[in-house]
Amino acid sequence: MTASARILVVDDERFFREGIRDALEASGFACAIAATGVEALDLASEPGIAVVVLDVVLPGLDGLEVLRRLRERQPELRVIILSAYTDQQRVLEALRLGAFDYLAKPLHDEELVLAVRRALESHAAWQGLVRLRTRIGALARSLSDLAELATADVDEGERQSVLRARAVAGVAEVLEAGKTSLLLLEEDGAHLRVVAATGRKQTFEEFDSVPLGAGVSGIAMARSELIVVSDVATDPRFSDRVVTGRYESPAFAVAPVTSGGQTAGVLCATDRAGGVPFEESDVALLRILALQLGQVLAPRSAAGETAPALADPLEAKLAELARRICDATTMEIEPARLLGAVLRPIAAALAAAPVSVYLRDAKTGELVQEAQCDAARCSDRPRLPRGRGLTGTVLETGRLVATESPVSDPRFDADVDTPEGGAAGPLLCLPITFRGKVLGVARIFPREPGRASARTGEVLAAALSAVMRNVLLYRSLLEAVDEVASARREAQAS
Protein backbone atom coordinates (compact mmCIF):
# COMPACT_ATOMS: atom_id res chain seq x y z
CA MET A 1 0.00 0.00 0.00
CA THR A 2 1.20 3.51 -0.77
CA ALA A 3 0.94 6.40 1.63
CA SER A 4 -0.81 8.52 -1.03
CA ALA A 5 -3.71 6.06 -1.56
CA ARG A 6 -7.11 7.50 -0.58
CA ILE A 7 -10.60 6.16 0.04
CA LEU A 8 -13.69 7.70 -1.54
CA VAL A 9 -16.84 7.29 0.61
CA VAL A 10 -20.14 7.67 -1.26
CA ASP A 11 -23.44 7.75 0.65
CA ASP A 12 -26.39 10.11 0.40
CA GLU A 13 -27.07 9.87 4.16
CA ARG A 14 -24.82 12.27 6.03
CA PHE A 15 -24.79 10.10 9.17
CA PHE A 16 -23.33 7.12 7.31
CA ARG A 17 -21.08 9.19 5.04
CA GLU A 18 -19.34 11.04 7.84
CA GLY A 19 -19.38 8.10 10.22
CA ILE A 20 -17.55 5.90 7.69
CA ARG A 21 -15.04 8.67 7.01
CA ASP A 22 -14.36 9.19 10.70
CA ALA A 23 -13.90 5.45 11.33
CA LEU A 24 -11.46 5.12 8.45
CA GLU A 25 -9.50 8.26 9.30
CA ALA A 26 -9.20 7.03 12.89
CA SER A 27 -7.44 3.97 11.45
CA GLY A 28 -5.02 6.10 9.46
CA PHE A 29 -6.71 6.16 6.04
CA ALA A 30 -7.06 9.36 4.00
CA CYS A 31 -10.62 9.89 2.77
CA ALA A 32 -12.76 11.96 0.44
CA ILE A 33 -16.59 11.99 0.62
CA ALA A 34 -19.40 12.34 -1.90
CA ALA A 35 -23.18 12.53 -1.46
CA THR A 36 -24.29 11.75 -5.03
CA GLY A 37 -23.30 9.46 -7.89
CA VAL A 38 -22.34 12.38 -10.12
CA GLU A 39 -20.08 13.82 -7.43
CA ALA A 40 -18.57 10.37 -6.88
CA LEU A 41 -17.65 9.97 -10.57
CA ASP A 42 -15.92 13.37 -10.53
CA LEU A 43 -13.94 12.68 -7.35
CA ALA A 44 -12.99 9.12 -8.37
CA SER A 45 -10.81 10.49 -11.17
CA GLU A 46 -8.64 12.47 -8.76
CA PRO A 47 -5.06 11.22 -8.21
CA GLY A 48 -4.63 8.82 -5.31
CA ILE A 49 -8.15 7.38 -5.15
CA ALA A 50 -7.70 3.62 -4.88
CA VAL A 51 -10.83 2.34 -3.12
CA VAL A 52 -14.46 3.46 -3.32
CA VAL A 53 -16.91 2.63 -0.52
CA LEU A 54 -20.20 2.98 -2.41
CA ASP A 55 -23.80 2.82 -1.16
CA VAL A 56 -25.77 0.69 -3.59
CA VAL A 57 -28.85 2.94 -3.29
CA LEU A 58 -28.37 6.59 -4.28
CA PRO A 59 -30.81 9.25 -5.50
CA GLY A 60 -30.55 10.20 -9.14
CA LEU A 61 -27.59 8.26 -10.52
CA ASP A 62 -27.99 4.87 -8.86
CA GLY A 63 -25.12 3.12 -7.07
CA LEU A 64 -25.15 0.22 -9.57
CA GLU A 65 -24.83 2.65 -12.47
CA VAL A 66 -21.98 4.44 -10.68
CA LEU A 67 -20.26 1.08 -10.24
CA ARG A 68 -20.76 0.22 -13.91
CA ARG A 69 -19.23 3.51 -15.05
CA LEU A 70 -16.33 3.23 -12.62
CA ARG A 71 -15.52 -0.26 -13.92
CA GLU A 72 -15.54 1.06 -17.49
CA ARG A 73 -13.44 4.14 -16.80
CA GLN A 74 -11.13 2.98 -14.01
CA PRO A 75 -11.10 -0.81 -13.75
CA GLU A 76 -8.20 -0.64 -11.31
CA LEU A 77 -10.39 0.90 -8.58
CA ARG A 78 -11.53 -1.47 -5.85
CA VAL A 79 -15.22 -0.82 -5.10
CA ILE A 80 -16.81 -1.98 -1.83
CA ILE A 81 -20.60 -1.97 -1.98
CA LEU A 82 -22.75 -0.96 1.00
CA SER A 83 -26.24 -2.41 1.25
CA ALA A 84 -29.08 -3.21 3.60
CA TYR A 85 -29.92 -6.83 4.29
CA THR A 86 -32.99 -6.43 2.05
CA ASP A 87 -30.89 -5.49 -1.02
CA GLN A 88 -29.51 -8.94 -1.81
CA GLN A 89 -30.47 -8.80 -5.50
CA ARG A 90 -28.66 -5.50 -5.87
CA VAL A 91 -25.64 -6.97 -4.09
CA LEU A 92 -25.52 -9.93 -6.48
CA GLU A 93 -25.78 -7.60 -9.45
CA ALA A 94 -22.97 -5.45 -8.03
CA LEU A 95 -20.73 -8.48 -7.64
CA ARG A 96 -21.49 -9.50 -11.22
CA LEU A 97 -20.48 -5.99 -12.32
CA GLY A 98 -17.11 -6.39 -10.60
CA ALA A 99 -17.50 -5.05 -7.08
CA PHE A 100 -14.54 -6.08 -4.93
CA ASP A 101 -16.57 -6.74 -1.78
CA TYR A 102 -19.77 -5.77 -0.01
CA LEU A 103 -20.71 -4.78 3.53
CA ALA A 104 -24.15 -4.88 5.10
CA LYS A 105 -25.60 -1.96 7.03
CA PRO A 106 -25.42 -1.27 9.90
CA LEU A 107 -21.65 -1.33 9.62
CA HIS A 108 -19.19 -2.64 12.15
CA ASP A 109 -16.04 -0.49 12.30
CA GLU A 110 -13.67 -3.46 12.47
CA GLU A 111 -15.32 -5.12 9.47
CA LEU A 112 -15.17 -1.86 7.52
CA VAL A 113 -11.49 -1.23 8.24
CA LEU A 114 -10.58 -4.82 7.40
CA ALA A 115 -12.41 -4.71 4.07
CA VAL A 116 -10.81 -1.39 3.11
CA ARG A 117 -7.35 -2.61 4.08
CA ARG A 118 -7.73 -5.71 1.90
CA ALA A 119 -9.01 -3.60 -0.98
CA LEU A 120 -5.99 -1.31 -0.71
CA GLU A 121 -3.66 -4.31 -0.71
CA SER A 122 -5.38 -5.67 -3.82
CA HIS A 123 -5.03 -2.29 -5.52
CA ALA A 124 -1.33 -2.15 -4.61
CA ALA A 125 -0.85 -5.67 -6.04
CA TRP A 126 -2.54 -4.55 -9.26
CA GLN A 127 -0.24 -1.53 -9.50
CA GLY A 128 2.75 -3.83 -9.02
CA LEU A 129 1.60 -6.04 -11.89
CA VAL A 130 1.11 -3.05 -14.16
CA ARG A 131 4.63 -1.86 -13.34
CA LEU A 132 6.02 -5.34 -13.95
CA ARG A 133 4.27 -5.53 -17.32
CA THR A 134 5.69 -2.13 -18.28
CA ARG A 135 9.19 -3.17 -17.27
CA ILE A 136 8.88 -6.44 -19.18
CA GLY A 137 8.08 -4.37 -22.26
CA ALA A 138 11.20 -2.29 -21.64
CA LEU A 139 13.17 -5.51 -21.15
CA ALA A 140 11.97 -6.83 -24.51
CA ARG A 141 13.15 -3.64 -26.21
CA SER A 142 16.54 -3.81 -24.51
CA LEU A 143 17.04 -7.46 -25.45
CA SER A 144 16.08 -6.66 -29.04
CA ASP A 145 18.59 -3.78 -29.13
CA LEU A 146 21.38 -5.99 -27.80
CA ALA A 147 20.54 -8.79 -30.23
CA GLU A 148 20.60 -6.35 -33.15
CA LEU A 149 23.95 -4.94 -32.09
CA ALA A 150 25.43 -8.44 -31.92
CA THR A 151 25.30 -8.73 -35.70
CA ALA A 152 25.45 -5.06 -36.70
CA ASP A 153 27.81 -4.35 -39.60
CA VAL A 154 29.84 -1.63 -37.86
CA ASP A 155 33.37 -1.10 -36.64
CA GLU A 156 34.09 -3.35 -33.62
CA GLY A 157 35.13 -0.41 -31.42
CA GLU A 158 31.95 1.46 -32.25
CA ARG A 159 29.87 -1.66 -31.68
CA GLN A 160 31.34 -2.19 -28.23
CA SER A 161 30.79 1.45 -27.28
CA VAL A 162 27.17 1.47 -28.40
CA LEU A 163 26.57 -1.95 -26.85
CA ARG A 164 27.78 -0.81 -23.43
CA ALA A 165 25.79 2.44 -23.56
CA ARG A 166 22.61 0.60 -24.57
CA ALA A 167 23.08 -1.92 -21.76
CA VAL A 168 23.21 0.68 -18.96
CA ALA A 169 20.38 2.66 -20.54
CA GLY A 170 18.32 -0.52 -20.64
CA VAL A 171 18.98 -1.22 -16.96
CA ALA A 172 17.96 2.34 -16.07
CA GLU A 173 14.66 2.00 -17.93
CA VAL A 174 13.78 -1.54 -16.87
CA LEU A 175 14.62 -1.06 -13.18
CA GLU A 176 13.60 2.62 -12.98
CA ALA A 177 17.06 3.38 -11.60
CA GLY A 178 18.53 6.87 -11.51
CA LYS A 179 22.14 5.66 -11.71
CA THR A 180 23.42 2.60 -13.57
CA SER A 181 26.87 1.49 -14.68
CA LEU A 182 28.75 -1.30 -16.40
CA LEU A 183 32.16 -2.21 -15.01
CA LEU A 184 34.52 -4.58 -16.83
CA LEU A 185 37.60 -6.36 -15.56
CA GLU A 186 40.87 -4.61 -16.41
CA GLU A 187 43.81 -6.42 -17.98
CA ASP A 188 45.54 -6.77 -14.60
CA GLY A 189 42.66 -8.99 -13.46
CA ALA A 190 42.54 -7.15 -10.13
CA HIS A 191 40.45 -4.06 -10.85
CA LEU A 192 37.12 -3.12 -12.40
CA ARG A 193 36.81 -0.16 -14.74
CA VAL A 194 33.62 1.80 -15.50
CA VAL A 195 32.99 1.62 -19.25
CA ALA A 196 29.45 3.04 -19.40
CA ALA A 197 27.15 4.85 -16.97
CA THR A 198 23.91 6.83 -16.69
CA GLY A 199 22.79 9.53 -14.26
CA ARG A 200 26.30 10.80 -13.45
CA LYS A 201 27.64 14.34 -13.70
CA GLN A 202 31.10 13.18 -14.67
CA THR A 203 31.93 11.00 -17.66
CA PHE A 204 32.65 7.34 -17.00
CA GLU A 205 36.31 7.90 -17.95
CA GLU A 206 36.68 10.05 -14.83
CA PHE A 207 35.76 7.23 -12.44
CA ASP A 208 38.47 5.52 -10.44
CA SER A 209 38.95 1.79 -10.92
CA VAL A 210 37.46 -0.50 -8.27
CA PRO A 211 39.64 -3.22 -6.70
CA LEU A 212 38.14 -6.69 -6.62
CA GLY A 213 36.55 -7.26 -3.22
CA ALA A 214 35.96 -3.53 -2.63
CA GLY A 215 32.46 -2.09 -2.38
CA VAL A 216 29.31 -3.75 -3.70
CA SER A 217 30.52 -4.08 -7.29
CA GLY A 218 33.95 -5.39 -6.31
CA ILE A 219 32.47 -8.04 -4.01
CA ALA A 220 29.88 -9.10 -6.61
CA MET A 221 32.69 -9.49 -9.14
CA ALA A 222 34.97 -11.38 -6.79
CA ARG A 223 32.22 -13.80 -5.81
CA SER A 224 30.59 -13.87 -9.24
CA GLU A 225 27.17 -13.59 -7.62
CA LEU A 226 24.22 -11.26 -7.77
CA ILE A 227 24.05 -8.96 -4.75
CA VAL A 228 21.04 -6.97 -3.61
CA VAL A 229 21.32 -4.48 -0.75
CA SER A 230 18.38 -2.66 0.84
CA ASP A 231 20.52 -0.27 2.89
CA VAL A 232 24.23 -0.24 2.19
CA ALA A 233 24.95 1.83 5.30
CA THR A 234 23.60 -0.81 7.67
CA ASP A 235 24.58 -3.96 5.78
CA PRO A 236 27.59 -5.42 7.63
CA ARG A 237 29.14 -6.54 4.34
CA PHE A 238 29.48 -3.01 2.99
CA SER A 239 28.99 -0.44 5.76
CA ASP A 240 32.74 0.29 5.94
CA ARG A 241 33.47 -0.04 2.22
CA VAL A 242 31.08 2.39 0.51
CA VAL A 243 31.46 6.16 0.34
CA THR A 244 28.26 7.69 1.79
CA GLY A 245 26.62 10.74 0.25
CA ARG A 246 27.45 9.70 -3.31
CA TYR A 247 24.01 8.21 -3.93
CA GLU A 248 20.49 9.37 -3.17
CA SER A 249 19.33 5.85 -2.28
CA PRO A 250 20.98 3.24 -0.03
CA ALA A 251 19.62 0.37 -2.17
CA PHE A 252 21.88 -1.37 -4.71
CA ALA A 253 21.51 -4.25 -7.16
CA VAL A 254 24.60 -5.69 -8.89
CA ALA A 255 24.65 -8.61 -11.32
CA PRO A 256 27.75 -10.37 -12.70
CA VAL A 257 28.20 -10.37 -16.48
CA THR A 258 29.58 -13.65 -17.79
CA SER A 259 31.16 -13.85 -21.23
CA GLY A 260 32.83 -16.90 -22.70
CA GLY A 261 32.38 -18.83 -19.47
CA GLN A 262 34.23 -16.20 -17.41
CA THR A 263 32.93 -13.35 -15.27
CA ALA A 264 33.86 -10.28 -17.30
CA GLY A 265 32.27 -7.54 -15.20
CA VAL A 266 29.15 -6.36 -13.40
CA LEU A 267 25.99 -4.39 -14.13
CA CYS A 268 25.06 -2.00 -11.29
CA ALA A 269 21.86 -0.11 -10.45
CA THR A 270 20.96 2.29 -7.65
CA ASP A 271 18.85 5.39 -6.90
CA ARG A 272 15.63 3.59 -7.78
CA ALA A 273 12.59 5.81 -8.34
CA GLY A 274 10.99 6.72 -5.03
CA GLY A 275 14.04 5.58 -3.07
CA VAL A 276 12.48 2.14 -2.47
CA PRO A 277 14.52 -1.09 -2.39
CA PHE A 278 14.76 -3.41 -5.36
CA GLU A 279 12.14 -6.17 -5.48
CA GLU A 280 12.44 -9.82 -6.55
CA SER A 281 11.13 -8.98 -10.01
CA ASP A 282 13.71 -6.16 -10.38
CA VAL A 283 16.49 -8.58 -9.53
CA ALA A 284 15.26 -11.16 -12.03
CA LEU A 285 15.08 -8.58 -14.83
CA LEU A 286 18.58 -7.30 -14.03
CA ARG A 287 19.92 -10.84 -14.16
CA ILE A 288 18.29 -11.42 -17.56
CA LEU A 289 19.89 -8.27 -18.97
CA ALA A 290 23.26 -9.30 -17.57
CA LEU A 291 22.95 -12.76 -19.15
CA GLN A 292 22.06 -11.29 -22.52
CA LEU A 293 24.82 -8.69 -22.33
CA GLY A 294 27.36 -11.42 -21.59
CA GLN A 295 26.36 -13.28 -24.75
CA VAL A 296 26.97 -10.31 -27.03
CA LEU A 297 29.87 -8.69 -25.15
CA ALA A 298 32.65 -10.87 -26.58
CA PRO A 299 34.52 -9.24 -29.48
CA ARG A 300 33.99 -10.71 -32.92
CA SER A 301 36.41 -13.25 -34.26
CA ALA A 302 38.78 -12.43 -37.08
CA ALA A 303 36.07 -13.60 -39.48
CA GLY A 304 33.71 -11.04 -38.01
CA GLU A 305 31.49 -13.63 -36.39
CA THR A 306 29.97 -13.64 -32.94
CA ALA A 307 27.66 -16.04 -31.20
CA PRO A 308 23.98 -15.40 -31.92
CA ALA A 309 22.41 -13.33 -29.17
CA LEU A 310 19.26 -15.39 -28.98
CA ALA A 311 20.00 -18.89 -30.21
CA ASP A 312 16.68 -20.22 -28.91
CA PRO A 313 13.68 -18.54 -30.57
CA LEU A 314 11.78 -19.07 -27.31
CA GLU A 315 14.01 -16.56 -25.54
CA ALA A 316 12.97 -13.88 -28.00
CA LYS A 317 9.37 -14.50 -26.91
CA LEU A 318 9.95 -14.65 -23.17
CA ALA A 319 8.94 -11.06 -22.58
CA GLU A 320 5.68 -11.64 -24.45
CA LEU A 321 5.04 -14.80 -22.42
CA ALA A 322 5.60 -12.94 -19.16
CA ARG A 323 3.29 -10.19 -20.37
CA ARG A 324 0.55 -12.76 -21.04
CA ILE A 325 0.98 -14.07 -17.50
CA CYS A 326 0.59 -10.57 -16.08
CA ASP A 327 -2.49 -9.96 -18.25
CA ALA A 328 -4.11 -13.14 -16.93
CA THR A 329 -3.43 -11.98 -13.39
CA THR A 330 -5.24 -8.70 -13.94
CA MET A 331 -8.23 -10.44 -15.55
CA GLU A 332 -8.78 -13.23 -13.00
CA ILE A 333 -9.22 -13.21 -9.22
CA GLU A 334 -10.42 -16.65 -8.15
CA PRO A 335 -7.26 -18.72 -7.48
CA ALA A 336 -8.13 -21.90 -9.43
CA ARG A 337 -9.02 -20.00 -12.60
CA LEU A 338 -6.07 -17.64 -12.19
CA LEU A 339 -3.49 -20.40 -11.83
CA GLY A 340 -4.94 -22.30 -14.77
CA ALA A 341 -4.83 -19.16 -16.90
CA VAL A 342 -1.12 -18.61 -16.23
CA LEU A 343 0.06 -22.23 -16.42
CA ARG A 344 -1.50 -22.99 -19.81
CA PRO A 345 0.60 -20.53 -21.87
CA ILE A 346 3.74 -21.70 -20.06
CA ALA A 347 2.99 -25.32 -20.95
CA ALA A 348 2.37 -24.35 -24.58
CA ALA A 349 5.44 -22.13 -24.95
CA LEU A 350 7.85 -24.63 -23.39
CA ALA A 351 6.15 -27.77 -24.80
CA ALA A 352 5.98 -28.96 -21.19
CA ALA A 353 3.87 -31.49 -19.32
CA PRO A 354 3.11 -31.23 -16.53
CA VAL A 355 3.51 -27.66 -15.27
CA SER A 356 2.67 -27.35 -11.58
CA VAL A 357 2.75 -24.98 -8.62
CA TYR A 358 3.32 -25.96 -4.99
CA LEU A 359 3.11 -24.03 -1.72
CA ARG A 360 4.78 -24.97 1.55
CA ASP A 361 2.45 -26.41 4.18
CA ALA A 362 2.83 -24.23 7.28
CA LYS A 363 2.47 -27.19 9.67
CA THR A 364 4.46 -29.99 8.01
CA GLY A 365 6.84 -28.02 5.77
CA GLU A 366 5.89 -30.29 2.86
CA LEU A 367 5.06 -28.93 -0.56
CA VAL A 368 1.38 -29.23 -1.44
CA GLN A 369 0.27 -28.96 -5.05
CA GLU A 370 -1.92 -25.93 -5.76
CA ALA A 371 -2.49 -26.37 -9.49
CA GLN A 372 -1.14 -28.16 -12.54
CA CYS A 373 -1.54 -28.07 -16.30
CA ASP A 374 -1.54 -30.97 -18.79
CA ALA A 375 -2.26 -33.47 -16.02
CA ALA A 376 -4.16 -35.65 -18.54
CA ARG A 377 -0.91 -36.41 -20.34
CA CYS A 378 1.30 -36.56 -17.26
CA SER A 379 0.36 -35.76 -13.68
CA ASP A 380 2.69 -34.26 -11.09
CA ARG A 381 2.89 -35.49 -7.51
CA PRO A 382 0.22 -34.16 -5.08
CA ARG A 383 2.72 -33.67 -2.22
CA LEU A 384 6.51 -33.45 -2.02
CA PRO A 385 8.68 -33.95 1.07
CA ARG A 386 10.76 -31.07 2.35
CA GLY A 387 14.53 -30.97 1.97
CA ARG A 388 14.85 -33.69 -0.66
CA GLY A 389 16.11 -33.59 -4.22
CA LEU A 390 16.59 -30.63 -6.53
CA THR A 391 13.08 -29.45 -5.66
CA GLY A 392 13.94 -29.29 -1.96
CA THR A 393 17.13 -27.41 -2.78
CA VAL A 394 15.15 -24.71 -4.60
CA LEU A 395 12.75 -24.39 -1.67
CA GLU A 396 15.54 -24.03 0.88
CA THR A 397 17.93 -21.79 -1.10
CA GLY A 398 15.58 -19.73 -3.24
CA ARG A 399 17.76 -20.43 -6.30
CA LEU A 400 16.22 -21.92 -9.40
CA VAL A 401 17.32 -25.16 -11.03
CA ALA A 402 17.47 -25.35 -14.82
CA THR A 403 18.88 -28.60 -16.16
CA GLU A 404 18.56 -30.76 -19.26
CA SER A 405 19.82 -33.79 -17.34
CA PRO A 406 18.75 -33.72 -13.69
CA VAL A 407 19.97 -37.29 -13.10
CA SER A 408 23.56 -36.11 -13.52
CA ASP A 409 23.18 -33.79 -10.51
CA PRO A 410 24.14 -35.49 -7.21
CA ARG A 411 21.18 -33.77 -5.50
CA PHE A 412 18.68 -35.50 -7.82
CA ASP A 413 16.07 -37.69 -6.13
CA ALA A 414 13.99 -39.83 -8.49
CA ASP A 415 11.10 -40.02 -6.02
CA VAL A 416 10.88 -36.23 -5.87
CA ASP A 417 12.28 -34.66 -9.05
CA THR A 418 10.11 -36.53 -11.57
CA PRO A 419 6.39 -36.36 -12.32
CA GLU A 420 4.19 -39.01 -10.79
CA GLY A 421 4.88 -42.20 -12.73
CA GLY A 422 7.07 -40.29 -15.17
CA ALA A 423 10.66 -40.66 -16.26
CA ALA A 424 13.45 -38.20 -15.53
CA GLY A 425 13.89 -35.48 -18.12
CA PRO A 426 14.63 -31.76 -18.50
CA LEU A 427 13.55 -29.82 -15.42
CA LEU A 428 12.88 -26.21 -14.52
CA CYS A 429 12.23 -25.77 -10.80
CA LEU A 430 11.56 -22.17 -9.78
CA PRO A 431 11.20 -20.49 -6.37
CA ILE A 432 7.92 -18.74 -5.60
CA THR A 433 8.83 -15.76 -3.43
CA PHE A 434 6.87 -13.17 -1.50
CA ARG A 435 8.45 -10.35 0.51
CA GLY A 436 11.85 -12.04 0.40
CA LYS A 437 10.60 -15.44 1.58
CA VAL A 438 10.35 -18.63 -0.47
CA LEU A 439 6.77 -19.84 -0.14
CA GLY A 440 6.83 -22.63 -2.69
CA VAL A 441 8.06 -23.79 -6.08
CA ALA A 442 6.90 -24.13 -9.67
CA ARG A 443 7.95 -27.24 -11.62
CA ILE A 444 8.11 -27.38 -15.41
CA PHE A 445 8.99 -30.55 -17.31
CA PRO A 446 9.76 -29.64 -20.95
CA ARG A 447 9.25 -32.51 -23.40
CA GLU A 448 11.82 -31.12 -25.84
CA PRO A 449 15.54 -30.47 -25.25
CA GLY A 450 16.84 -26.93 -25.02
CA ARG A 451 13.85 -25.53 -23.16
CA ALA A 452 15.15 -25.70 -19.58
CA SER A 453 17.30 -22.56 -19.67
CA ALA A 454 18.21 -20.35 -16.72
CA ARG A 455 17.08 -17.25 -18.57
CA THR A 456 13.63 -18.76 -19.12
CA GLY A 457 13.50 -19.65 -15.44
CA GLU A 458 14.40 -16.13 -14.31
CA VAL A 459 11.54 -14.56 -16.26
CA LEU A 460 8.97 -17.13 -15.22
CA ALA A 461 10.02 -17.10 -11.55
CA ALA A 462 9.43 -13.33 -11.37
CA ALA A 463 6.08 -13.55 -13.16
CA LEU A 464 4.79 -16.53 -11.18
CA SER A 465 5.79 -14.95 -7.88
CA ALA A 466 3.69 -11.92 -8.82
CA VAL A 467 0.77 -14.22 -9.62
CA MET A 468 1.01 -16.01 -6.29
CA ARG A 469 0.97 -12.69 -4.44
CA ASN A 470 -2.51 -12.10 -5.87
CA VAL A 471 -3.62 -15.65 -5.02
CA LEU A 472 -2.50 -15.31 -1.42
CA LEU A 473 -4.05 -11.86 -1.11
CA TYR A 474 -7.42 -13.13 -2.34
CA ARG A 475 -7.32 -16.09 0.03
CA SER A 476 -6.48 -13.93 3.01
CA LEU A 477 -9.39 -11.66 2.08
CA LEU A 478 -11.83 -14.58 2.01
CA GLU A 479 -10.52 -15.94 5.30
CA ALA A 480 -10.81 -12.54 6.97
CA VAL A 481 -14.35 -11.98 5.66
CA ASP A 482 -15.37 -15.45 6.84
CA GLU A 483 -13.92 -14.78 10.29
CA VAL A 484 -15.76 -11.48 10.64
CA ALA A 485 -19.02 -12.98 9.33
CA SER A 486 -18.71 -15.87 11.78
CA ALA A 487 -18.05 -13.47 14.66
CA ARG A 488 -21.13 -11.43 13.74
CA ARG A 489 -23.31 -14.54 13.58
CA GLU A 490 -22.10 -15.63 17.01
CA ALA A 491 -22.74 -12.16 18.42
CA GLN A 492 -26.27 -12.10 17.01
CA ALA A 493 -26.97 -15.61 18.33
CA SER A 494 -25.97 -14.61 21.85
Image (cartoon, rainbow, N blue to C red):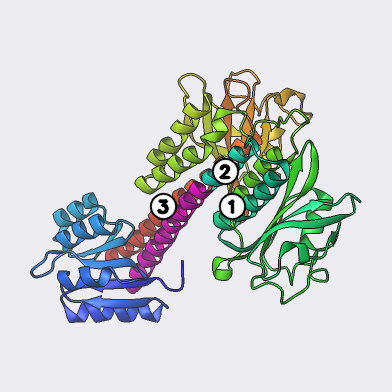
Between the residue at mark 3 and the residue at mark 1, the CA separation in whole angstroms equals 34 Å
* Mark 2–mark 1 CB contact (< 8 Å): yes
Q: What residue is disc 1 on?
A: 170
Q: What residue is disc 2 on?
A: 145
Which mark's residue is nearer the viewer, 3 or 1?
Answer: 1
Q: Residue furthest front?
A: 155
Which mark's residue is nearer the viewer, 3 or 2?
Answer: 2
Percent x, y of residue 318: 53, 37
Q: Which residues are magenta?
A: 109-138
Between the residue at mark 2 and the residue at mark 1, the CA separation in whole angstroms equals 9 Å
Q: Is residue 77 left or right of residue 187?
A: left
Q: Amino acid at mark 2?
A: Asp
First in sequence, mark 2 or 1: give its number: 2
Percent x, y of residue 184: 78, 51
Q: What residue is disc 3 on?
A: 474
Percent x, y of residue 82: 22, 65
Q: Is residue 319 left or right of residue 215?
A: left
Please say if 298 is above or below 34.
above
Disc 3: CA contacts within 10 A as few (<14), some (14-19) or many (>=20): some
In the structure shown, which secondary structural element does the residue marked by tag 3 occupy? helix
| Residue 114 covered by magenta stretch | yes
Between the residue at mark 3 and the residue at mark 2, the CA separation in whole angstroms equals 38 Å
Residue 132 visible within the image: yes
Please say if 298 is above or below 435.
above
